[in-house]
Amino acid sequence: MACTHDHSCEDHDCSSNWSLYKHIDLAKVTALNEANPGSVKSVFKAWEERLNSSRERLESNEGDPELLVYIPFTSDVKIKSISVVGGADGTSPSKLRVFINREGIDFSDAQSMQPVQEWELVENLQGVLEYQTRYSKFQSVANITLHFPESFGGDTTQIHYIGFKGEATQLKRDVVATIVYEITPNPSDHKTRAETGGGLSHVE
């Protein structure tokens, strides 16, 4: 289901208050089949900048409109909706399929796997539409993969903006990693039976 922003976003919860932009681990965002390597990072920006066309855009290779975008977050998030602003002249993506907490997906995987949710998109050149998720399925999202299989007839798919609405947990993912690391036993800290006269030689 798509929501149309036919109101003043300044008076509603539509701007940076809900945006998960700051929780995206931008350095680790990747895309398959992008014409200009690294350009995918340019489509993640503040809500207020979503129509800024002066920046680089994400575009697929000529004659192949399929795109696969991997987005990790710095903390687990709950995603309420997704917004996509595509290109003109038939280059906007026409369909979106989403996978959650699956790393290393390629096109073969995406085409054969059942997505968590999929949408038939419309050309959203003014950035006034957002697509509501099945919220109960979008809890504790560490990473999300967006599969855009085709455009509206264009030779390429162009994307100027991708945004997520939702909530982030307070615990950062790097903090979680540190905690896990610290509670993992270091074998050098544990003496063997021969060295101590008792105890275990290996800690599971």
Image (cartoon, helix red, strand yellow):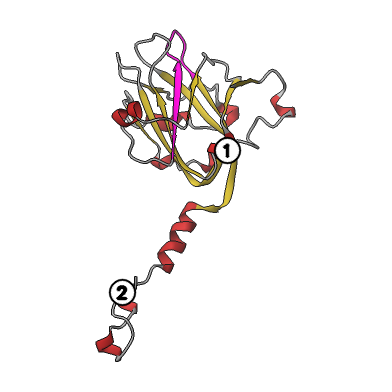
Residue 173 visible in the snapshot: yes
Nearest the viewer among 167 and 12 is 167
Residue occupying the point 71% across, 28% down: 10
In the structure shown, which secondary structural element does the residue marked by tag 1 occupy? helix
Which image quarter holds the C terminus?
bottom left
Residue occupying the point 69% across, 26% down: 9
Sequence-earlier tag: 1 or 2: 1
Which residue is the site of mark 2? 187
Nearest the viewer among 191 and 92 is 191
Which residue is the site of mark 1? 136
- What segment carries the magenta color? 86-100
Residue 19 image-quadrant placement: top right
Q: Is residue 94 magenta?
A: yes
Which image quarter holds the N terminus?
top right
User: Mark 1, mark 2: which one is toward the viewer?
Assistant: 1
- Residue situated furthest right in the rendering: 11
